[in-house]
Image (cartoon, grey):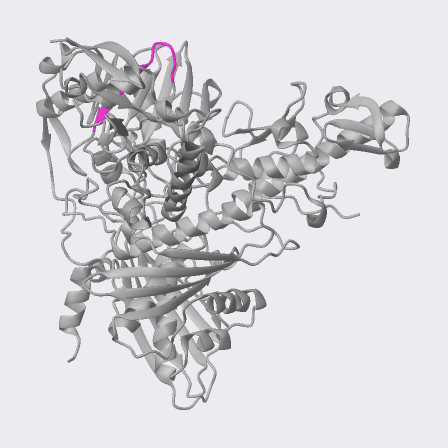
Amino acid sequence: MSTTHTIVVNRTPYRVTVDHYETPLLYILRDDLGLKGTRFGCGNGSCGSCTVLVDGHAQRSCELPVWSIEGKSVTTIEGLGTVDRPHPLQRAFIDFQAGQCGYCLSGIIMTAAELIGTGAEPSREKIVAALDANLCRCGAHARIVKAIEAAWKASTLGAAR
Amino acid sequence: MSRPKLPWSIEENPLLCQWVDFSEPGIARVFSAKVEIGQGIVTAIAQIAAEELKLPMSKVLVVSGDTRCCPNENYTAGSMSIEIGGTSVRMACAEARHAIVERAARMLDADESRVAADGGLILLGGAPAGLDYWQVAREVDWKRPITGTAPFTAPESSTFLGKSVARLDLPAKVAGPAFIHDLELPGLLHGRVLRPPSYGARLRSLDQSAVEHLPGVVKIWRNGDFVGVCCEREYQAVRALEALRAGARWIESEVSSGTRSWRELLPTLRSIDSESEAGERPAGAANVRRLSATYSRPPIAHASMAPSCAVAVYDEGRLTVWTHSQGVFPLRGALASAIGLDESHIAVIHVQGAGVYGHNGADDVALDAVLLARQVPSRPVRIQWNREDELAWSPLGSPMVVKIEGAVSAAGDIIDWSSEIWSGPHGQRPRARGPVNLLAAAHVDPPIPFPEAYEVLSGFAGGARNSEPGYDLPHRKIVLHSLPGLPFRTSALRTLGGYANVFATESFMDELADAAGADPVEFRLHHLSDPRARRVIETAVRLADWQFNAERGRGRAAGIGFARYKNTAAYVAVIANVEVREDVRVSKVVGAVDAGLVINPDGVVNQIEGGIVQSISWTLKEQVVFDGRRVTTRTWEDYPILRFDEVPELVVDLIERPDCSPLGVGEAAQGPAAAAVANAVARALDLRIRDLPITRERIVAASAAAPA
């Protein structure tokens, strides 16, 4: 039986109709809203590729039924910044060439966005701990950690200005 | 003037128009069949083209992996993309610019020596002559063969070569759609394929009734043991697949006895044997010490971050396929054979996927999409595998056993070396053996089964890659036992046999050094006359925390590994520092690399860093488990890979050789990194683990078995 839900993604409200009320948010984002920067990796929350922010917290969109996010605010990688106006995290990932195939990066950046959003300086240990459930197969880990450290510095400098 | 030797890609695609096109004003289109698989090749090719065409990179558009317009360069594989593909583009672009200069001189009625082409403009005596490349290009006969005589830009005067140009594809990848998975086409259907539960399983019955009426189901197609479904929306396809799974009854059978260790199992299997021998055993060496040791590696999964994906549309007898395959041309041929359609009616177009480390499911999923697209003509069908199929059904890197016997004299010289290898085949890509080699082709009716595949030393022998040590040895013998009957599909995974052979060779070098009472670095250098090999080892030692005289068995040590990939490509020496408590923790890794002329230094460092990290993951954590019927490691929980908190500090040093040919680096670090870790663990524990991966269980078992 189809159900209709009101969700807010990247500050825009949408009404979406789904066949199955437990349809994961990931498919809504990609199929209905055309937000393809959130990526499918495993379907059971163990790789982190599909990470989005829900009310500022990093969550796995492949496991989040659409009904569970009604009344909450979702941010995807598209809501963070664009190619032309990148978020400090996106900027830093490019500056550090922190990736190889790049498939894991959207989820990693969203995980890092939660960390940076707290405002407290993330130590290397905190960054590594936050990324514990994000996988990268190409081996770009060391650059990714450096990019996140640099992004925090850039974003706090930007905020102080 | 003698004709220079042309790279293979140019010999196969000899005309300038197959490589460069100026028909669009302001843009030089450069064609290559070498595709982006996460290694940065498209950026490197754009650098090369911009350099030789003397154009800004913004005016160069690399079109890669499209059978409609690109040269047929077979596969993007074997770390040959820069060596062969890049050199070909360089040659073609140097010659294209020369053709423009030559034509412009005639148009201007000027001596060629006074005419130059730079930045898109034609210069006469250094001043703009009122012509640009594109005006002149209209007058050039681009169907001329490439001669290889146009000089390359000298390294010292180059603008883009040797520069760390940022990856062209990265900005989109951190902002939105960038992958084949994100492709949008009008009328796109989402499909899924129901794979059998195990190798050898046959579909006895399929109850479709519960699926037909599910929302969005457009087509269910069963043919033999192949079942697929197409739906309007993706999650509908996910649900439909689960419903099909529930309605399928399979007959499974045992395909192998399977539970023994690879070390025990592989030498008992039927093998096709070949051997090679070189040099002479020196006569009369005194006080010779003979050593023998056997090493093994398990099957390893590609485990790409994204499941394989493809899109196909079949319209009026013509097929268009979008794929992240490493070889659009061989795939086109394999698809043509699989469905009986002429190649000329098939276009295969590369779109980036997640990192590809060899022959994974990319080609197989393309046939899945083609089979289903033919059932719903004119509607594009997108098939995406799920995580379980990606880990269980992609071809695997073959398990291997390597037994080495050697002898060292009292003077510390290695006087004999023989290596015996048991390995499944490493090259079963589409069209590599037999016309098809695609998963679904073996499941449809009538099936096109996988041909029996094996390797011999006189031909392509992936299992023997790097089995020949790169050291000065008076006598060496290699025996390859190629195993055609492994119960699962094996094919190319980064380095092929190089990973296991370098792990074994370099472990054995340490064992020989111990027997000779020598320092492992000194021992290696003593057997290395190649100055480039010596230099990477010396560089790594200088940059690393190197304490060979430290007491053994204290849970902390350094180890070294060295190889020249394929004995012809890049030189890499790696030194790893490890701490062993319950698990092995790699704290720091130093890599020194000589890759000849480097097109993009940061790109090379990134590839080496990635190779080291992936190798540590293989070496400490990864093993595919096969229970006699099926691969049981189907999730990231069953098949863990290295995590952020397990990644060491990395230092990579490039030795610049601008006057040497460029050498591929995508596979150069894995063998040396594995050996460095294994040698460090052996020192930290004073106990050698010869079976990979070096897990906690292995360490406990080896400690228990060791003499007190």
Placement of B39 over or under B320, stated as above or below: below
Quarter of the image for residue A92 reads top left
B507 w.r.t. B620: above or below: below
Q: Is residue B163 left or right of residue B488?
A: right
**B193 is within the stretch colored magenta:** yes
Q: Is residue A57 magenta?
A: no
Could you tell me residue B214's position as x and y percent? 14, 12
Q: How many numbered callouts? A: 0
Q: Residue B335, relative to residue B696: is it above or below? A: above
- Viewer-closest of B76 and B557: B557
Among all residues in the image, which is located at the extreme front? A160
Q: Which residues are magenta?
A: B184-194
Please indicate, yes or no, whether residue B501 appears anywhere in the rendered image: no
Q: Is residue B72 left or right of residue B632?
A: right
Q: Quadrant of residue B24?
A: top right
Q: Nearer the viewer, residue B708 or B648?
A: B648
In the rendered image, the quadrant that contains the N terminus of chain A is: top left
Residue B561 seen anywhere in this rendered image of the structure: yes
Quadrant of the rendering where the C terminus of chain A is positioned: top left
- In the rendered structure, the answer to whether residue A38 lies left or right of residue B128 reads left
Give the x, y percent position of residue B138. 74, 19
Seen in the picture, residue B379 relative to B263 is either above or below; the reply is above
Q: Looking at the image, which is closer to me, B264 or B118?
A: B118
Q: Position of residue B389 (x, y in %)?
A: 23, 34
Picture coordinates of residue B97 (x, y %)? Answer: 73, 33
The foreground one among A8 and B309 is A8
Residue drawn 56% across the image and 46% down it = B83
Horizontal arrangement in the rendering, residue B31 relative to residue B676 (left or right): right
